[in-house]
Amino acid sequence: MNSPAAELAEVVKRYGAKTALNGVRLRIERGKVTALLGPNGAGKTTAISLLLGLATPDSGRVELFGRPPQELTARRRIGVMLQTAALPETLRVGELVELTSSYYARPRGLGEVARMVGIEELLLRPYGALSGGQQRRVQFALAVCGNPELLFLDEPTTGLDIEAREALWNVVRALVAEGSAVLLTTHYLEEAEALAQRVAVLMNGRIVSEGTVDEIRAVGVRRHIRCVSSLAVAQVREWAGVDAVSGRDKRLDIEVRTAEPVVRQLLAADPSLSELEVTRAGLAEAFMQITKGPMQEEAA
C-alpha cells in the first residue's frame, strides 16, 4: 500500500518535432487527490494518455499499480471521466451504468451509484435526451461505478451547476477517505484548492512546481489587507511595504508581502477603520506566479 497507484518516471514523449513531456516525474498516491495543473498545451492530456495506456513514452517508465498501463488487470482497477465522451445515445442511463459495471470485478450496485451521484431520476431516460449537465453526471457515474482504486477526472465539473459540482466534490472526498487515489485536472483552481492534497504544475512539458496545496500557495507570498477606511489610496500607496493599492467607496484592497507593519500603520492613521481582513495568496495567485516565468521564456 506504500507504493503509488500510478507513476511517471523521467518520461519523455514527442510528437514529431514537438516535445510534449520532457523528463516528467509524477506519483499518484493512494488516498489522496493529486491535481495536475497547467495552461492549455502544457502536456496534461499527454500525461493522462500515457497513464491510461493510450500512448507509450519515447523514454522513461509509466506504471499503473506497478504494472504497464496497457495490462487489463491494471486497467480494471481504474475509473475515467474525460472532458468529452461518446456514449450510445439510445441506451437508457441505467443500461449504461450496468453495462460499464459489468467490466469490473467488484462494481457498486446500480442503486448505490445512482444515489451517490444523484441520477436516480435519470435511470430510465435515454442518454441522448439528457442536458449537457445531466450527461456529465452520468459520465461521473460511469467513472465510479466500478469501485475504482484510481480515478482519473479530467475537467470533471465543466458544464455542472454549483449544486451538482458540490455533490461531485463530496463523492470524491468520500472515495479518497476510503483509500482511492484521484488524479484531477481542472482549470478551476478553487476546485483544486478544495479537493487536492498534492498539486503538480506542468509547463512546457515539465513539472515546474510540486507539493501540498499549502506549499504551492506559499509561492504566492503576498497578502491582501482589506478594510473600510477614510484614507486616500494615494496616501497608502506611498507607505513602505505596500506593493499595490486599489479602492472604491472607502473600501481599500492593499497588497503587501508582510502584513503586520502595514496593519499597525493603518490603525494608527485611521482610528475609525473597520472591517479589517488579512488574507494570504490563494492557489490561483500562486499558480500565476509559478507559470509567469516559463510562459515568458516560451514566448521569447
Image (cartoon, rainbow, N blue to C red):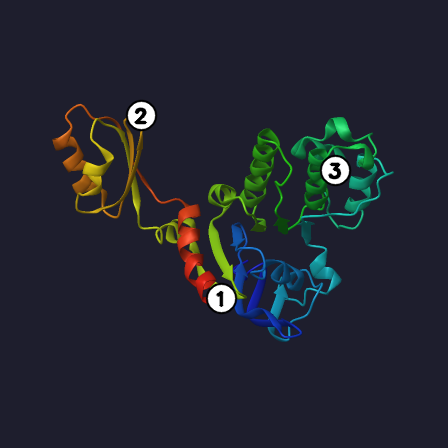
Residue drawn at (59%, 29%) of the image:
163
Name which quarter of the figure residue 63 lies in.
bottom right
- Check the image and report above or below for 129 versus 152: above
Q: Which mark, by number, is residue 249?
A: 2
Q: Nearer the viewer, residue 97 or 273?
A: 273
Which numbered disc, 2 or 3, marks the residue that appears first in the sequence? Answer: 3
Residue drawn at (84%, 40%) of the image:
89
Which quadrant of the figure contains the N terminus? bottom right
Disc 2 and disc 1: Cα gap in Å? 41 Å
Residue to which mark 3 is pinned: 109
Crowding at dot 2, Cα within 10 Å, few <14 / some 14-19 / many 20+, comes out as few
Q: In this view of the protein, can residue 214 be seen by the observer?
A: yes
Could you tell me residue 90's position as x and y percent?
Answer: 87, 38
Could you tell me residue 93's position as x and y percent?
Answer: 80, 36
Crowding at dot 3, Cα within 10 Å, few <14 / some 14-19 / many 20+, comes out as some
- Check the image and report above or below for 131 versus 75: above
Quick one: SS at disc 3? loop
Could you tell me residue 206's position as x and y percent?
Answer: 51, 66
For the residue marked with disc 2, what is the amino acid? Asp
Quick one: SS at disc 1? helix
Residue to which mark 1 is pinned: 298
Could you tell me residue 42's position as x and y percent?
Answer: 56, 60
Quick one: SS at disc 2? loop
- The extreme top residue here reads 272
* 283 relative to 121 in the view: left or right: left
- The extreme left residue here reads 268
Which numbered disc, 3 or 1, marks the residue that appears first in the sequence? Answer: 3
- The extreme front residue here reads 234
For the residue marked with disc 1, what is the amino acid? Glu
Which numbered disc, 2 or 1, marks the residue that appears first in the sequence? Answer: 2
Q: Nearer the viewer, residue 66 or 24?
A: 24
Disc 2 and disc 3: Cα gap in Å? 56 Å
